[in-house]
Image: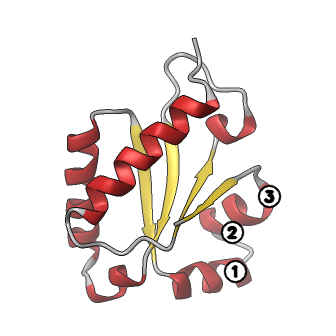
Amino acid sequence: MPQKRSDIESIIQKFVEALKQQGLKVDKIILFGSQARGDAREDSDIDLLVVSPDFAKMPFYRRFEVLGTAIARVREPIEPLACTPEEVQLEKLSKASFLYDVLARQKTVEYRL
């Protein structure tokens, strides 16, 4: 059975807490994909865009380490992407990117923290 919105929100809160425990300041989380559209299946993951200014100081491999550590702590099927606020703004201008599609064309749910 697909997860209820309240379950998703609880998982997101735990994930954000796991990120904060690593010293990451999270500006916002954007839920996208099947969970945001409301057509998730039992085996659907939770697609998240994590927006943090702290990612600007990190090489990409370090971003993946931080996200992976948080996923391991939460132990839920989370598929996160990491972006800075500036990267989000640039992607909104680029009409040929995956993030543009997510931000401009897909149904999303934004959590400001």
Residue farthest along the right direction in this orientation: 105
Q: Quadrant of residue 1?
A: top right
Give the Cα distance between marks 1 and 3: 13 Å
Disc 3 marks which residue?
105
Secondary structure beneath label 3? helix
Nearer to us in this view, 17 or 94 = 17
Say which residue appears at 74% left-offset and 38% top-offset: 37
In the figure, 81 relative to 38: above or below?
Answer: below
Say which residue appears at 36% left-offset and 87% top-offset: 56
Secondary structure beneath label 2? helix
The kind of residue on which mark 2 rests is Tyr
Say which residue appears at 38% left-offset and 56% top-offset: 16
Q: Residues within 10 Å of mark 2 (few under 14, many from 20)?
A: some
Say which residue appears at 48% left-offset and 33% top-offset: 45
Q: Which of the two labelled residues, at mark 2 and mark 1, occupies the earlier sequence position?
A: 1
Give the Cα distance between marks 2 and 1: 6 Å
Secondary structure beneath label 1? loop
Question: Could you say which disc has been placed on residue 100 in the image?
Answer: 2
Give the Cα distance between marks 2 and 3: 8 Å
Nearer to us in this view, 19 or 65 = 19
Question: Could you say which disc has been placed on residue 94 in the image?
Answer: 1
